[in-house]
Amino acid sequence: MKQQNYENHSKIDPAYHAGIALLSLITLILTITFFVKNVGTETLLSFVVLFVVLTIILIGIKLRTYALQLQDRIIRTEESFRYYRLTGNPPDARLSMKQMIALRFAPDEEFPGLVDRTLTENLTAKDIKKTIQTWRADHHRV
């Protein structure tokens, strides 16, 4: 597997980003076209088709959001435990979720110091990732 770093750490899931998202967009466009063409003659059917497609798309978006929120909570728990294991103290409550998620890329040697620097300088997630000297890969997040 390729060495992960700041430039290549984002992950694209082809099945979701190119397949499902693209098909959803095409379906929505076709549904809107159907709605506009048939709203005068088949009004009820036009509304039903539009609402069903919108509902299915919104369900897909919500399910993806739930999965990402769960991943965020797991990462926060893992990194909180890692900080406790390395320092013997719980992490500062001022650390935001985004900061904690960005800190997961820091190796154990850099982690406690980077947490302190993050709190002192109020680093953004992007700044945290750029600050990391030796990248700790995370190949499981989607």
Image (cartoon, rainbow, N blue to C red):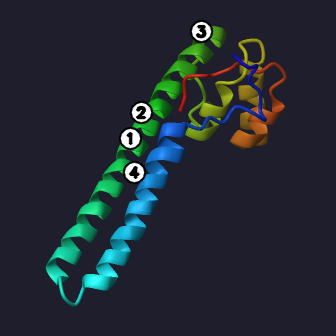
Please give the residue where the numbered disc 2 appears in the rendered image: 70
On screen, residue 27 versus residue 49, left or right, reads right
Front position among marks 4 and 3: 4
On screen, residue 107 versus residue 101, left or right, reads right
The span from disc 2 to disc 4 (Cα, nearest Å) is 14 Å
Q: Amino acid at mark 1?
A: Tyr
Q: Nearer the viewer, residue 65 or 86?
A: 65
The span from disc 2 to disc 3 (Cα, nearest Å) is 22 Å
Q: Residue 17: in sight, yes or no?
A: yes
Helix, strand or loop at label 1? It is helix
Q: Nearer the viewer, residue 142 or 114?
A: 142
What residue do we see at 74% from left, 41% from top? 126
Front position among marks 2 and 4: 4
The span from disc 1 to disc 4 (Cα, nearest Å) is 9 Å
Front position among marks 1 and 4: 4
Helix, strand or loop at label 2? It is helix
Q: Earlier in the sequence, mark 2 or mark 4?
A: 4
What residue do we see at 80% from left, 26% from top? 132
State yes or no: discs 2 and 1 in contact (Cβ < 8 Å): yes
**Residue placed furthest toward the left:** 44
User: Which label was assigned to residue 61?
Assistant: 4
Helix, strand or loop at label 4? It is helix
User: Which label was assigned to residue 85?
Assistant: 3
Q: Nearer the viewer, residue 50 or 84?
A: 50
Q: Nearer the viewer, residue 17 or 111?
A: 17
Q: Give residue 19's position: percent from left, percent from top.
A: 48, 45
Please give the residue where the numbered disc 1 appears in the rendered image: 66
